[in-house]
Image (tube, grey):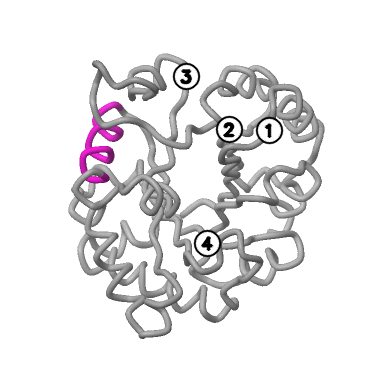
Amino acid sequence: MRKNIVAGNWKMNLTHSAAAQLLEGLAAGSYPEAVRMLVGPSFIQLEQSQRILADTSIQVMAQNVHQAAKGAYTGEVSTEMLTSAGIQTVILGHSERREMFQEDEALLTQKVDAALAAGLEIVFCFGEKLDERKQGKQNDVVAQQLEVVLSRPQADWSKIVLAYEPVWAIGTGETASPEQAQEMHAFIRSLVEQRLGAEVAEQTSILYGGSVKPSNASEIFQQPDVDGGLVGGASLQAEDFLAIANAF
């Protein structure tokens, strides 16, 4: 059975003290045992996050990782650094990394290879821009971006979580309708089934990431192929993030 997941991507937000306050609020909150919760703070807050959440089931993930094992890459973080710090999950392919830092399929393939080789689980993001959806190209765009992980063998898929993020609905306040989300998630699952079989497709969690908030989470999560959310802004408030988890 695939897991229901609510993952918070903090992006470049929160001071050390503000992060501690958020983490303490999460640690004191309640959420369904059946829902897997993750938070993705900045690199400098990973240790603090693990320490404050140590007595909870909330896991800490990294927002990015470099593809090289080590070397002269100023400002970067390697897979070994993450795993040695106890981090087991990393976000890859987020639309902001693709757009602002020019991370293309070739680079993401290297990052996915490095992360999986290190035993890291990946939350792999992908999704179309507004003009691509208006032109009816969303399925083609998603299929192309998914090639990075669809090319991986079945054995790797226990470490892969998919996160569909329509770029036009990230940080804009716009949200795909539940029907639009379900249509795309069903298409994504069909691609996985075609390449890797029904068992892998059924076990793969596919998250929706596009302005998920307490007011719309329940309706989105009720869709049969939506297994949770990759949450941005709403993950910066403990009350909102917990409310999203409780939407299940």
Between the residue at mark 1 and the residue at mark 2, the CA separation in whole angstroms equals 9 Å
Task: Assign a secondary structure to mark 3.
Answer: loop
Q: Indicate the amino acid at tag 2.
A: Pro
Pair 2/4: label in front? 2
Q: Residue at x 55, y 81 (%)?
A: 179
Residue 86 marker: 3
Residue 187 marker: none
Between the residue at mark 2 and the residue at mark 3, the CA separation in whole angstroms equals 14 Å
Disc 1 marks which residue?
Answer: 14
Q: Residue at x 68, y 59 (%)?
A: 248
Q: Earlier in the sequence, mark 1 or mark 2?
A: 1
Q: Earlier in the sequence, mark 1 or mark 4?
A: 1
Would residue 152 be found to the left or right of residue 121 on screen? left
Q: Overall secondary structure of the magenta stretch?
A: helix
Pair 2/3: label in front? 2
Is residue 158 at all visible to an observer of this figure? yes
Q: Residue at x 38, y 41 (%)?
A: 122
Q: Indicate the amino acid at tag 3.
A: Gly
